Image (cartoon, rainbow, N blue to C red):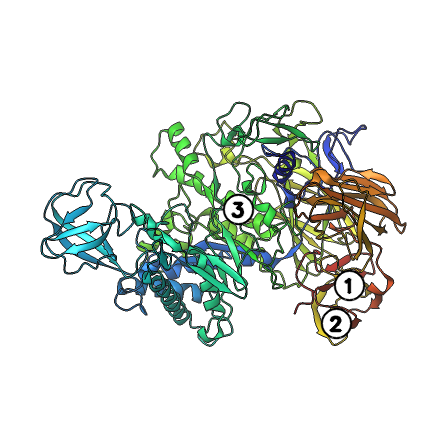
Amino acid sequence: MSKRRLIIAVVLLALLGTPFQPVAKAAGTVTPGIQGSWDGVTDKATLEGAYIDPFQQEIPFGIRSYFTVPWRSYMDTWDSRRYLDTVGVVFNNIKQEEAAATAAVMAEAGITSARLEIGWSNLDYNDETKIKAVYREAFRAQLTALRNNHIRPLILLNMNSGMPSPNVEVKTAVTQKAAKGDRVIYLDKTAGIKPLYTGLKGMGPAMFPIITAVDAATGQCTLSAPLPNDVPKGAISLVKLKYQPFSGPVFKDGTPNPASRETLDGWLRYIKTVAEIVREDLGTAGQPDAGFDFEVYNEYTFGYHYMYMDNYYEPKRGFAQEMTYSKDGKSVTGIEVLLPITADFVSDPANGLPGVRVISGFSNQRPHDNGTSIWPNQAGYSRHYYTGYDPVKSIIGPGSASSYTSSSKIYYNALGRLDGVRKPANINESIPGSYFIPNHVMTMPEEWTYLYTTESMIRDLTPFPGPWQDHFRYASPGNGKTAELWMTETNYYRLPFAQKLMEQSKVAAADQQLSNVMMETGAKALSRLYTFYAHKGVETITAYNIRNQDNCFGILPEGFFEELKKNNYQLNDAVRSKIGPQIAVLKNIANLMKTGQPIDTARPLSVTRLTEYKPQLVFAGDGTAEHPSRYNRDDFAILPYQLADNKFALAYYVMTRDITRSYDETKGPLDPARYQMPEQEYEISLANVAGQGAKISAYDPMTDQAVPAQLLRADANSMVVKVKAADYPRFLIIEEAKQGPLISAPMLAKTADGAQLGFFSNVSGVVEVTYGQYPARTAGTVTETVYADVKFGKQSGQNVLDSLSNLTPSGIGSWKWTGTIVPKYTERYSFTAHSDNLNETKLKINGQEINVGGPVGAAINLKAGEPYQIELSFLNRYNSQHYVNLYWSSLSQERTIVSLQPLPESVITLPVKAGEYVNLPIKGMEVGDGVKIRLIGETGITARYPFWDYDRTAVLYN
């Protein structure tokens, strides 16, 4: 591994890199009885405490990344629809008679999406326009129940090799015992056997081995592969599939393979049939939205055999050509042609499926899919990242057997410096370091946003590109549409925790007390999962499973279905009393969110200070700045949702690493109170909120009760509140005395000489509009100087650019980008470079070098209105292409691309009146340009549109 590649690998493990200086021990004292406060104005911390916006939870400690850094400018604020649109469940295992009642309690809990598998094998073998009669009424009942409760179905299109396509049973008998390894079997009747389409059952995937030839006279049947087991003499059931497994159109010997096209055509018939049946049951034919979505395939790790014919043959048949699907210069090869074929079928107006989104399920269990790589008519892609307690993996510390502490890891310390590489397989020797690993337990719903593994989901949710250039929230395949990221299966797996308690308490799996603990654990996990991931921007989460064992994944308790059956499947008070704590807490959160109004772009709130009373240790460090101890304040989540122009609901909780922790060991293992985290007091300082005259309250959805909240200080645009937090979401409700600023109904349209911008302001104030090339949306001047060598010696060219975004130096050489920045605020600004080669990325401001070449970034004090000369440089020692982005942020400025001093003509400032529609012509705008609006109310409270620079809205496209 070259030095360059090693540096890249190390940086990638840190994902985005932090924009602020690492928190070190600060001198001074704090209020008696209060420890661990971080002040965003002075950028100082007492002890090692720091407020961390959980949007960037990949940076705080993971085995590979040990940071404690303030993230004060990254916080999202969403309207309540973001939460309500996210909540879904998997709807499998629901019987026909249970569907109506189950869907009704789901809807009451705010569940708006349900994943339902209608597999290819459900189609009738003899009439593929129909579903088999044995399944038809069940699907009709399920779809009707979802329709009646306004729950949108996500239909899983699947071909699991357990039974992959339309099929019929062929009954016959074995006349001679066949031994393991045999290549033939003898049958008494062969009339129903179709060679190449018929095979055995129970030997692996359905139709394996395949019968490739039949001698009707002797009953001899030749097999595609040796028998994996003995086959005794006597009755046997074979399976005949409508189609052969997927395969290439030409065998390796050049012989055409007509089965390739036949199977693909069968898939198209499958899509058509399912679409028509779902549309019929939903009653949406001719409507502007057909009312459902498709997910194509489910998980590569099992049931995959039907994807490729050679999985059924030994020796393999081999193909000179593979399946390929091409359109508009883009191609897909292999089994994943099913995804664009489906997406293009759905998008064809002739098929009558408006509004249907197509999501990739091929991406369920792999990390490399992203928004730039999807097919143009594909809406998005999904992940299946489960969490749960594991008696080995969850226990982390020096010498533990957890895979998180295994060899071949790369370590960073809290200062953002490399802390050692322990004998990676792909380099010759280790890099010295402390390899410090603190003792702790990690079992939490938010695991996939920490960097315990490199497959962190947060890289696809950040609102700007990071070290993985194509992985971010607004990634697009180039059509101006943002790709959606779904989690079509996830949940917290409770069974190992249940087994631990069964062993401790000597009870059986059916013990009701055990079930109660598991349901309470599920409620804590599920409320955290939905609230957190909705706020990170996941489009839809369909948690597995609305019906499952209490001790595993079940969301509704098994007792609910037992009571439902007792009551003739009628939903009444007796049945509702059995919904359990998971549905109950979701119902309470949904009822709060349903009080919200639709808001086009929520007002950004920010946290400037967090104070933890009676600090609680998460894990102990070693007393050095490199390895500080970590406290609950470092894992504290604050997730704002806006309900109205003057009302917010902020979810807050301690994001405990171990949701199975015993807090009160005086209580027995089967007492849910044993696992309840004691309330802990925090002070939260909020900005861009009108504190004067505001009313506050706090709500606990787990108990459906008000909890204490105190307004300590308030002024025109900030407040300080005291709350008592738990290890699950509670909500701080803020209602301002007056209307707050909102930008509504924004519209940008191309005109002959530029663009027309329109929007409403609900308050009087001042609007600043900037425009320019996406994503910076300002027209500044950057001088790019190109050098033919790597020493900035031999100049070979010069260009003028608009901003320091999406820079793509290519080939051997060196580059400098220079210009002038003018900050808006007198504050400490943090600068962060994102590149696939940070080691060669340097930044100077007024000649002073700023270290942006590591994952922590760097900070510098700047004065408002003063010009500063900036020089960003990069060198490339190899004949390859790279990318560089430079960001800056401060207490008052959200993280944005570094914008150079804008040209006067690219900034428009004008007064607005409440309720006034602003209609603004902007000359000179071109395709690829965008606008940015900042509305400043009379009290200084601000709103902005779009929320983030990389948002695809307010941009001109062809």
Instruction: Identify the residue at horizontal 78%, vertical 29% (top origin).
Output: 26
Q: Under tag 3, what secondary structure?
A: loop
Type of amino acid under label 1: Tyr
User: Which class describes the residues within 10 Å of circle 1: few (<14), some (14-19), or many (20+)?
Assistant: many
Q: Position of residue 557 (x, y in %)?
A: 40, 47
Q: Residues under labels 2 and 3: Cα distance?
A: 39 Å
Quarter location, residue 115: bottom left
What is the C-alpha distance between the residues marked 2 and 1? 10 Å
The residue under label 2 is: 755
Q: Secondary structure beneath disc 1?
A: strand
Badge 3, how many Cα within 10 Å: few under 14, some, many 20+? some
Q: Pointer 3: what residue?
A: 367
The numbered mark, 2 or 3, whose residue comes first in the sequence reads 3
Q: Which is more toward the observer, 473 or 227?
A: 227
Find out whether the residues at labels 2 and 3 contact each other: C-beta distance under 8 Å.
no
Residue 151 appears in the rendering: no
Label 2 environment density (alpha carbons within 10 Å; few <14, some 14–19, many ≥20): many
State how far apart marks 1 and 3 are (Cα).
35 Å
Q: Is residue 130 visible?
A: yes
Quadrant showing the N terminus: top right
Is the residue under label 3 in contact with that under label 1 (CB below 8 Å)?
A: no
Q: Is residue 824 left or right of residue 298?
A: right
Badge 2 marks a residue whose secondary structure is: strand
Amino acid type at image mark 2: Ala
Q: Which residue is mark 1?
A: 771
Point 71% across, 54% down: residue: 604
Name the spot of residue 643 as percent of width and height, x first.
65, 58
Do labels 2 and 1 touch, CB within 8 Å?
yes
Locate residue 334, reporting x and y percent.
43, 55
